Image (tube, rainbow, N blue to C red):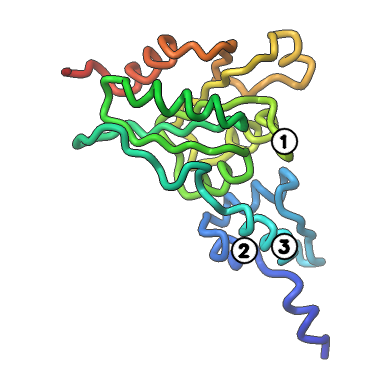
Amino acid sequence: MPPIAVEKSFCTTRQAATLLGVSVGTVQLWVESGLLQAWKTAGGHRRVLRDSVESLLHKKPVAPFGPPVVTVSGPRRLRVMVVEDDPSLLRLYEAQLARWPLPMELTLMDNAISALLHLGRGGPDLLIADLHMPEMDGFAMLRVLSQSPEMAQTKMVVVSGLDADEVSARGGVPQGVEVLAKPIPFTKLLSIAQGLTGPVQI
C-alpha cells in the first residue's frame, strides 16, 4: 500500500479545477501551457502536482487595488479587464476608463497568472493587456486564452511599447487580437468598447 503522502502529492484535473474554481477544460489548458505541472498515467489520465496548484492559489489575489471597480451602474455593464504590471499605468487606466460614457465593470490585474485565474471563471467583454510582464508574459497568456472556450466572446486588445517587428520576433499574438502602441490610445480603446455595446444614450 503506497504511503498516504504520495497520494496527497497529486490530484486529478477535476480535483484541481474544484480547488482553483475553474473548469476542467481550463485546467487542461493550463497544464498544456506549463502553468500547472502534471503527467499522464499509463491509462492516459492527467495527474496534477498539488504543489503547482498550491502555488497558483497563493497568487490568487484578484486585483492590486482591491475588488473589481464598478465605475458606472446600469442594467447591462460592459465587463472590462486590464492586465498591466506597471502600477502607475494601472491607475491611469482606472482614472481614464471611469470617465467613459459606458455602464462598466472594470477589473485591474497586475500580472498574467492572477488574470488567468480570474478569467478561468469566465471572460470579460473586453480584455486589454500588456505584453512585457514578469513570470508569465502577455504572449504566453494570450496563447492560452485564445484556446479557452470561456474567452470565445471576448475582444482581446494588446497595448504595448514593443514595435511590430519586436512583436513578430517573439512569436506574434493570436489571430484576432488587435495590437495598439503605447502611449495608451484611450480614444481608440473607447471606440472599440463602444463597438461592443452599440450606441450609448448619455
Mark 1: amino acid: Pro
Give whichever of 175, 89 is nearer the camera. Answer: 89
Q: Is residue 50 above or below residue 109?
A: below
Q: Is residue 165 above or below residue 174?
A: above
- Quadrant of the image containing the C terminus: top left
**Residue placed under numbered mark 3 in the picture:** 48
| Marks 2 and 1, how far apart at CA | 24 Å
Mark 2: amino acid: Ala
In the displayed structure image, the side of residue 46 where residue 82 appears, left or right:
left
Label 2 residue SS: helix
Give whichever of 200, 40 is nearer the camera. Answer: 200
Of the two numbered discs 2 and 1 on the same chain, state the one appearing first in sequence: 2
**Residue placed under numbered mark 2 in the picture:** 16
Of the two numbered discs 3 and 1 on the same chain, state the one appearing first in sequence: 3
Residue 60 in percent (x, y) is at: 57, 54
Q: Check disc 3: other Cα within 10 Å, few if <14, some if 14-19, many if 20+.
A: many
In the displayed structure image, the side of residue 121 where residue 34 appears, left or right:
right
Label 3 residue SS: strand
In the displayed structure image, the side of residue 38 where residue 17 appears, left or right:
left
Q: Residue furthest bottom?
A: 1
Q: Check disc 1: other Cα within 10 Å, few if <14, some if 14-19, many if 20+.
A: few
Q: Check disc 2: other Cα within 10 Å, few if <14, some if 14-19, many if 20+.
A: many
Identified at 51% across, 26% down, the residue is 128
**Residue placed under numbered mark 1 in the picture:** 134
Q: Is residue 76 above or below residue 190?
A: below
Mark 3: amino acid: Val
